[in-house]
Amino acid sequence: MKRILRKMTSICIAIAVVATMGLTSLATENIDGNGNVIGDKDPAAELTSTLIIEKELTGYNPTTTQVYAPNVSYSYTIAGIDAQKVVTDEDGVSATTQEGPAGAAITETISWSSTEKINASAAGEANRKDITIDLSSVTFPGAGVYRYEITETCAAKEANGVTDGTIAEVRYLDVYVRDAKADEDPGYKIYGYVLFENNNNIDGRDDATTDTVEDAVKTEGFVKTDSLTADSYYTYNVTVTKELRNDSSHESNAFPFVFVFTKDAGVTGSFNLVSSLTSDPVEMTDSVTANLAHGESISYTGIPCGTVVDIIETNNVSTAAYQVTTTGADTNITDKLVNYQETTGDTAVEVNGTTVGAAGTDYDITFTNTLALISPTGVVLAVVPFIILLGFGVGLMVVCTTKRKKEDS
């Protein structure tokens, strides 16, 4: 009996030791997040206290090209949020998020200006800049998961032709913190960052059905995703070609053109355009002038969608009366004739420029000046009426003579 009691006591002690070790392990096991992936537990790594996320401006143009950016500026704030959300890794280890301590900072402003070019295409091209989050001044009170809220602000987005994306202006950053190891300097160490679009509970287990990582949507920043659009800049292009017909003597003459730009209501910012005739940016003022001879063209690339363009040609050849035809524009305008002797042709066309936030169109417009060919004047035209009368008289005499012969017979 004594031997049995001693064996039972030993077994109970062993069970208690194992149970204690298991509980200790569960209590001290860290929630992962290293490498921005929940479920990859490697808390040994220590990450820098500086984190880079991104801001995207998507450029649109019917041609894959570069356009001058709009003047737009974004500022950011970061503050701890007492969300009290439950974060669970793929092994079922959970922690409740704590409010991020003070000291986190985003000091720079993210800007694009009309003097720099961005990429654009019909499908949209991502143009990204870095947002630096500095946590070096944060003192963490202990190990755990700390949540911050990042808020974006832009005061004059629409006024500068930028279409607001469908993404929200806030992001949520979880910072994973552990205690220092024996061979490290004392203090708490950051070993993981995860950025989300939504302030949700996080459940990384494979069989999770609600509040999953997918619901929170991990992201790189304020950027375009499969389901959401980033802030966008829509532009289009206009090309004008000059043609001259029946007047080879004036093919080298440069005909003046005026491009009148009327921005969409509410768009008050300044813009630059890419011109095919110069490498310098062309300021999109109320009107821009260009001179084109026969066979020459000019293109303006990166016109903000919603801008209406009126294109007016002036005849500076005083000795020629041209008939003018145009192709490729939305509307022919007859009330903007300038110094033309012939009013049978239009000298101005209009490009409607679609609407703000819509895909643009490439406009390829041709102004054709045709010198009308007229019949020679003088002897030929002078005798034509008499020839007609003479022919009529001869015909009448033939008829009368034939009739008279018939009567004599």
Image (spheres, rainbow, N blue to C red):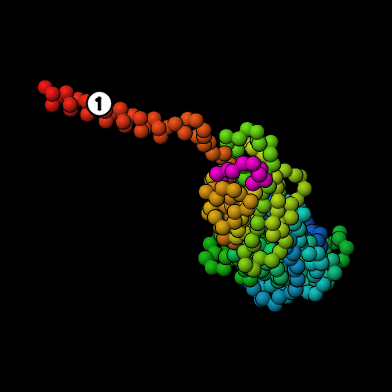
- Front residue of 133 and 176: 133
Residue 301 makes an appearance in the image: no
Residue occupying image coordinates x 64% and y 46%: 315
Residue bounds of the magenta highlight: 315-324
> Which quadrant holds residue 150?
bottom right
Q: Residue at x 33, y 29 (%)?
A: 391
Residue 334, horizontal then vertical, whole percent: 54, 55
- The one nearer the camera, 161 or 227, is 161
Q: Residue at x 52, y 36 (%)?
A: 374
Q: Nearer the viewer, residue 227 or 66?
A: 66
Q: Amino acid at mark 1?
A: Val
Crowd band around label 1 with a 10 angstrom C-alpha radius: few (<14), some (14–19), many (20+): few
100 lies above or below 256 = below
Of residues 120 and 21, which is closer to you in this image? 120
Location of the C terminus by quadrant is top left
* Residue 194 % position (x, y): 69, 62
What kind of secondary structure does the magenta stretch mostly adopt? Answer: loop
The residue beneath circle 1 is: 398
On the question of residue 186 being in view, the answer is: yes
Secondary structure of the residue carrying tag 1 is helix
Q: Is residue 363 above or below residue 106?
A: above
- When the figure is inspected, residue 28 is found, relative to residue 308, above or below; the finding is below
